[in-house]
Amino acid sequence: MKVKKRLFEIFGPILFAALLMFAVFLSPTWIKFSYVSPKVQRNAAASLSPLILKGQLIKRSALENNYVPFFGSSEWSRFDPFHPSVLATKYHRSYRPFLLGARGSQSLTQFFVMQSINQQMKNKKAVFFVSPQWFVPMGEDPNAFSFYYSPLQTTTWIQQEKGSKMDRYAAYRLLQMPSGDSDKIISGTLARIAAGLKPTSFQMLYVNYRHRVLLNEDQIYSRFRIPVNNAKKIANNAAELPKTYHFQQLDKLAGQLGEQHTNSNRFQIGNRFWNRRLKHHVKALKGFQSNMSFLKSPEYGDFQLVLNQFAKDHTNVLFIIPPVNQRWQKYTGLSSEMLKQFDQKITYQLRSQGFNHIDDLSQDGNVNYFMTDTIHPGWRGWLKMDQEINPFLTKKQKAPHYRIDKSFYSKGWQQAGSDFDYYGYSVKGSLKM
């Protein structure tokens, strides 16, 4: 008896703790741990953490409290005094950007991110940064997608899918990624959805079970998963700005700061980026982009998933199309004609479906201190974007009327070249009859 009692004293607490954790993770979703403090929301909004991108609770809480989703990629990490988060903080805007994206995240990642915040996007506003560099022949890098992949977002989407063209295409694309095959039951579920079939009862039972465990895990742990806090960086940058917003004064300051931070090279590339990434092998990069094209890519189909979801949620979106640093573009041989054709193609995909809020900056690559490196905006670039972002988010906008065209999922559109002539599209952006 003494031995049994001793064993219970040793292992009893461990067993009890294990049973308690098991009960918590399998608890019904009505048992919530949903309070997220304003400080956690503020830190998460600018953290650019992959864990925040994959989660749900913090994003939902923030978007219900005047934060606006800013979808994109690595550009949001280029903080300077004119970054959208800095300007919104300094000038006490009625909105706060919630930055969603990091290096390597593209349209397919963002589509699944949206699944965790659909209710918070309904009839609301968003900003979406469209990077030309996403539209390479292979599309989104499978390894990058796997890094940002969230089983919680996938199970959330499966619970809501209706067998639409959007759902079938999303399942098909997910199956092309290693993440789609990481769970055999989920993989089988995706295969049925891609084929236009409903998941089996067993598959949905498993999906619901996984969703409950993942959701409870997110609710318990998410607020402790903010490894990067950029709040101090934002405050320090805001301190460099004048108290009153005056565009001409700010534009002059942006030019001065840009000049100070790019004085090590003739391409107006930030000194830090230049010294770390380019300085020692710049000669080998001359002309290396002469054969690069952004016209044929599965990214156009993934981008259509994003547009389809925005339309489904009636989200009013401002799309930003950035330029490429023209000095660097000429040095590396990246075709200006190809970039012009890319702009025509992506703009047509947007406007023909009713997405008319477009801040097209594609012609500004030669503006002094517009870019902070080869492809990312900075200083004067951020400031010019603010001329569209601020009024779009602070003033009332007409409700959008979207007309989703399923043909944009087709291989024909994805592979349409410079004249858009493959699938019945004209170069001028009007559908051939």
Image (cartoon, rainbow, N blue to C red):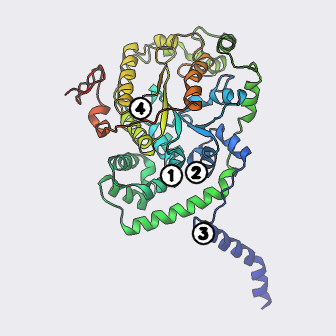
**Residue 88 falls in image quadrant:** top right
Q: Which mark is residue 153?
A: 1
Q: Which badge, 4 or 3, comes first in the chain's sequence?
A: 3
Marks 2 and 3, Cα distance to the nearest angstrom? 17 Å
Q: Which badge, 1 or 2, comes first in the chain's sequence?
A: 2
Residue 350 seen in this snapshot: yes
State the residue position of label 3.
Answer: 27
Q: Are marks 1 and 2 in contact (CB under 8 Å)?
A: yes
- Residue at (38%, 47%) from the top-left corner? 170
Name the secondary structure under disc 2: loop
Badge 2 amino acid: Gln
**In the image: residue 182, left or right of residue 231:** left
The mark closer to the camera, 4 or 2, is 4
Marks 4 and 2, Cα distance to the nearest angstrom? 27 Å
What is the residue that sits farthest to the top in this orientation?
A: 266
Image location (x, y in percent) of residue 118: 50, 48
State the residue position of label 4.
Answer: 355
